[in-house]
C-alpha cells in the first residue's frame, strides 16, 4: 500500500525557501558496521570541532538561518535548538556519542553538510507523513521519555495519524518512531532553508543513501520535496522502495 509524504502549504507559506530531501531506505541491517559508523562519526565530529574553533555557534552561516526560522513560528531558538545546532554543540564539546549505525551515518552527513537530518522507523509510523503546523492537540512523547508534551499551536511538526513524531521542525523526535538496531525500513529527512545550499543538500542526501547501502545493505531512493512538488508517494515491495508516479 502506498504511503505519502506531504509538505503542507501552511509551512511553505511561512517558509517559502524550505526544501526537504527525503530518503526511503529498506531492507537494511542496522546491526552491521557499528564500529565503522562510530569511527566515521568521530571523524566528522572532529572536523567540525576544528572548523568551529572559538566561533559562536549560533552565528555560523549554517546555523543562524534556523534560529530565524524558529522565531518565525513563535518559539525561542535558545530553548528549542535546531538539530544541527545541537549536533554542532556536541561535536565542539567532544560529547557526541554513537547511537546505532543508521543514526551515526545520518549524523555524519548532517555534520558534513551543515544541515539538519533525522530519521524514523517506517514500521512505527501510522499512515501518511505530514510536515505541517500544529494545532496543539497532537500527542508527542519525546525520545527517552514517557510524558506527553504536545506541540505549541502553530509550531512546525512532522506528524502521522497517531500524533507528532518530530517537534519544532527538527528539534526533537518522538520515542515511538525512533530508529533502533531492529529497524529495517526507514524514512530520513534533511531540510534546507538557504537557497544557496539546495544543490548541496541534494548531493548530501545521495551521499547518505550511498553510505546506507555500503554499510548496512538494502536499497534506497532519494527525492526532493519542494513547494512546487509538495508530496512524494512510495511503497515498499520485497525488492526495495519504489516511488509512485
Image (cartoon, grey):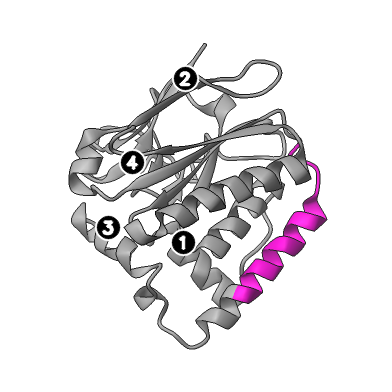
78 to 73, vertically: above or below: below
Which residue corresponds to mark 1? 84
Residue 222 visible in rendering: yes
Which residue corresponds to mark 2? 3
Mark found first going from the N terminus, 4 or 2: 2
Left or right of 62 on screen, residue 178: right
Mark found first going from the N terminus, 1 or 4: 1
Q: Quadrant of the C terminus?
A: top left
**Does 40 appear in magenta?**
yes
- Give SS at disc 2: strand
Mark found first going from the N terminus, 3 or 4: 3
How far across and how far down the image is residue 33, in percent? 80, 49
Q: Marks 4 and 2, how far apart in space? A: 18 Å
Q: Marks 3 and 4, how far apart in space? A: 12 Å
3 vs 2, front mark = 2
The residue sitting at the top extreme is 1
- Give SS at disc 4: strand
What's the residue at 54%, 51% (across, down)?
203
Which residue corresponds to mark 3? 70
Give the magenta-colored segment's residue range.
29-47
What's the residue at 33%, 69% (across, down)?
64
Q: Residues within 10 Å of mark 4 (few under 14, many from 20)?
A: many
Q: Quadrant of residue 148?
A: top left
Q: Marks 1 and 4, how far apart in space? A: 16 Å
Mark found first going from the N terminus, 3 or 2: 2
Amino acid at each position: 500500500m502506498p504511503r505519502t509524504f506531504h509538505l503542507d502549504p501552511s509551512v511553505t507559506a511561512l517558509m517559502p525557501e524550505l526544501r526537504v530531501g527525503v530518503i526511503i531506505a529498506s531492507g537494511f541491517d542496522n546491526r552491521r558496521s557499528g564500529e565503522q559508523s562510530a569511527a566515521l562519526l568521530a571523524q566528522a565530529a572532529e572536523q567540525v570541532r576544528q572548523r568551529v574553533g572559538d566561533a559562536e555557534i549560533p552565528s555560523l552561516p549554517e546555523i543562524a538561518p534556523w534560529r530565524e526560522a524558529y522565531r518565525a513560528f513563535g518559539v525561542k531558538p535558545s530553548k528549542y535548538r535546531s538539530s544541527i545546532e545541537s549536533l554542532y554543540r556536541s561535536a565542539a564539546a567532544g560529547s557526541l556519542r554513537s547511537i546505532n549505525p543508521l543514526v551515526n551515518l545520518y549524523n555524519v552527513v548532517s555534520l558534513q553538510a551543515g544541515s539538519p537530518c533525522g530519521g524514523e522507523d517506517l514500521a512505527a509510523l501510522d499512515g501518511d507523513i505530514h510536515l505541517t503546523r500544529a494545532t496543539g492537540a497532537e500527542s508527542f512523547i519525546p525520545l527517552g521519555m514517557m510524558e506527553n508534551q504536545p506541540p505549541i499551536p502553530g509550531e512546525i511538526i512532522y506528524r502521522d495519524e497517531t500524533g507528532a513524531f518530530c517537534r519544532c521542525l527538527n528539534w526533537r523526535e518522538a520515542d515511538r518512531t525512533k530508529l533502533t538496531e531492529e529497524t529495517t525500513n526507514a524514512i530520513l529527512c534533511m531540510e534546507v532553508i538557504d537557497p544557496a545550499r539546495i544543490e548541496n543538500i541534494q548531493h548530501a542526501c545521495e551521499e547518505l543513501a550511498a553510505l546506507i547501502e555500503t554499510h548496512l545493505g538494502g536499497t534506497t531512493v532519494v527525492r526532493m520535496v519542494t513547494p512546487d512538488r509538495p508530496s512524494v508517494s512510495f511503497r515498499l515491495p520485497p525488492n526495495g522502495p519504489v516511488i509512485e508516479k
